[in-house]
Image (cartoon, rainbow, N blue to C red):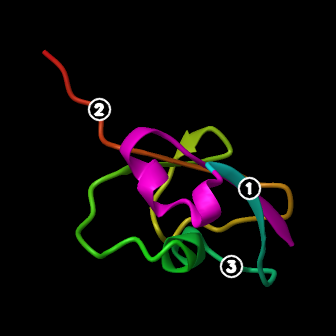
Amino acid sequence: MRVTVKLYNEMKRFAPADQTEFSVELKPGSMAVSILEILKIPEGEKFTLLVDGRRADAGTPLFDGSTLVLFPPISGG
C-alpha cells in the first residue's frame, strides 16, 4: 500500500534526501510507527502526528492512500 508523508517545520530534518513530501510503500496492515521507524525519528522526540487529517499516535493504522503529517508541537499563549 502507498502512503503519503508530509513533514513540516523542524520535522523536515528527518526528510529523506530533503524531500518534505513523499510516498512510501508499506505492507498492508502497517501502523504509523512504521513511518517513524523509516524516518529514524528518535524515541522521545516531540511532534504532532495526523493521519488523514485527524490527530493520531504511533499505533494508528494506515491504509492505502493515507496521508501522514508530522510537525512540531504547537504552543502559544
The x and y percentages for residue 64 are 85, 64
What kind of residue is marked 3?
Ser
- Residue bounds of the magenta highlight: 1-19
Q: Is disc 3 surrounded by few (<14), some (14 to 19) or many (20+) residues within 10 Å?
A: some
* Picture quadrant where residue 16 is located: bottom right
Label 1 element class: strand
Left or right: 47 as drawn, with respect to 34: left
What kind of residue is marked 2?
Ile
* Picture quadrant where residue 71 is located: top left
Q: Which mark is residue 74?
A: 2
Image quarter of the C terminus = top left
Label 2 element class: loop
The answer to whether the residues at label 3 and label 2 have Cβ atoms under 8 Å apart is no
Asked if 58 appears above or below 18 in the picture, the reply is below
Q: Which mark is residue 60?
A: none
The x and y percentages for residue 57 are 45, 60
Give the mark nearest the N terminus, 3 or 2: 3
- Which residue does the numbered mark 1 point to in the structure image? 22
Q: Is residue 3 magenta?
A: yes
Q: Is disc 2 surrounded by few (<14), some (14 to 19) or many (20+) residues within 10 Å?
A: few
Asked if 1 appears above or below 10 in the picture, the reply is below
Label 3 to label 2: alpha-carbon separation:
27 Å
- Which residue does the numbered mark 3 point to in the structure image? 30
Which one is in front in this view, the residue at disc 3 or the one at disc 2? Answer: 2
Left or right: 67 as drawn, with respect to 18: right
* Picture quadrant where residue 35 is located: bottom right
Image quarter of the N terminus = bottom right
